[in-house]
Image (cartoon, rainbow, N blue to C red):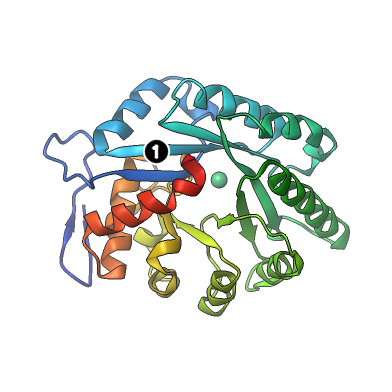
Amino acid sequence: MYVDPDSDRLFQNDLHRPDRELVTIGVDAHCHLQFKNYDEDRDIVIRRAKEAGVGFIVCVGTTVADSKAAVALAEQYPGFMRASVGVHPTELSDAPQFDAVRELARKDSVAAIGECGLDYFSAEGRALKAEQRELFLAHMALAREVGKPLMIHCRPSPRSMDAYEDLYGILEKEKNRPPFVMHFFAGSVALAERFIALGAYFTFGGAVTLTHDYDEAVRRVPPERLMTETDAPFVSPVSIRGRRNEPANVVDIARQIAHLKGMAPEELAEHVWKNSTILRR
Ligand SMILES: [Zn+2]
């Protein structure tokens, strides 16, 4: 249980509580349900998401094999789940097999291209960063070709905004820019403003329940550009910190985002559902 210091509202998070308050329709725009973390109980996790009010999930691939697994999973749940296919910037060893991602990209079950982007936190040296930028450009060309949005991961070096600056530069220069989602945006408010001007969509996840660091960015993003995510199995919300995350928890995240936006949870859910059209159609 977590007491919100601003409002004294109680966040009660026992997933199995039958009287658990529901947000009308939740969206988990970025999670990794195809990971082996769910091999034992994936169907139960999916059922819990539905019971919690989640109406749409995007399973995001991080390597070629993982993207294939995300597609295979999504195809079992048409109308409820879609995949995103790509090679994560920390998985550069898969870059030579990018053609396999190209093959997956046209499938109906594929909503977006990624997880792609820049991760300077893990990249030592200029060569690796250049390779990441090149791989990101390949994703962007593919997104344009198949008419699907980019699912972007961006993580700067410690105490820096370098990766966001570089990513912004690349997107800004691109005349025929595909729609794009900044997954778990952790940049400054000033950067948020610049990405908003480029037409970015933003997802925020469990981190908004753990710290106030993202409050201002959440407030600044227009409701028409906002989506919710869990990034499950990573980044559990405060309620279950340390345990495996899962899409059902997006309901708690949405409630906190609604609180920060000064909206009723239902109103936020309506916006998020509408915004998720770019991934659902
Ligand atoms: Zn992710």
At 78% from the left edge and 44% from the top edge, which residue is drawn?
92
Residue under pointer 1: 56
Q: Which amino acid type is marked by label 1?
A: Phe
Q: Is residue 231 left or right of residue 242?
A: right
Q: Is residue 240 visible?
A: no
Look at the numbered disc 1 and give the secondary structure of its residue.
Answer: strand
| Residue nearest the viewer, comparing 43 with 211 | 43
Q: Say if 175 sits above or below 273 in the image.
A: below
| Residue nearest the viewer, comparing 134 with 214 | 134
Quadrant hosting residue 46: top left
Q: How many marks?
A: 1
Q: Is residue 88 visible?
A: yes
Can you give x and y, in whole percent of width and height, for residue 9 in the image?
16, 62
At 25% from the left edge and 32% from the top edge, which residue is drawn?
51
Q: Say if 58 sits above or below 271 in the image.
A: above
What residue occupies the far bottom of the structure in this picture?
A: 190
At 74% from the left edge and 29% from the top edge, which residue is drawn?
103
Q: Is residue 70 left or right of residue 233?
A: right
| Residue nearest the viewer, comparing 207 with 95 | 95
Q: Is residue 35 left or right of residue 216?
A: right
Quadrant where ligand 1 appears: top right
For label 1, count other residues whose C-alpha is less than 10 Å away and answer few (under 14), some (14-19) or many (20+). many
Can you give x and y, in whole percent of width and height, for residue 179 in the image?
60, 55
Q: Is residue 169 left or right of residue 31?
A: right
Can you give x and y, in whole percent of width and height, for residue 160 in the image?
65, 73
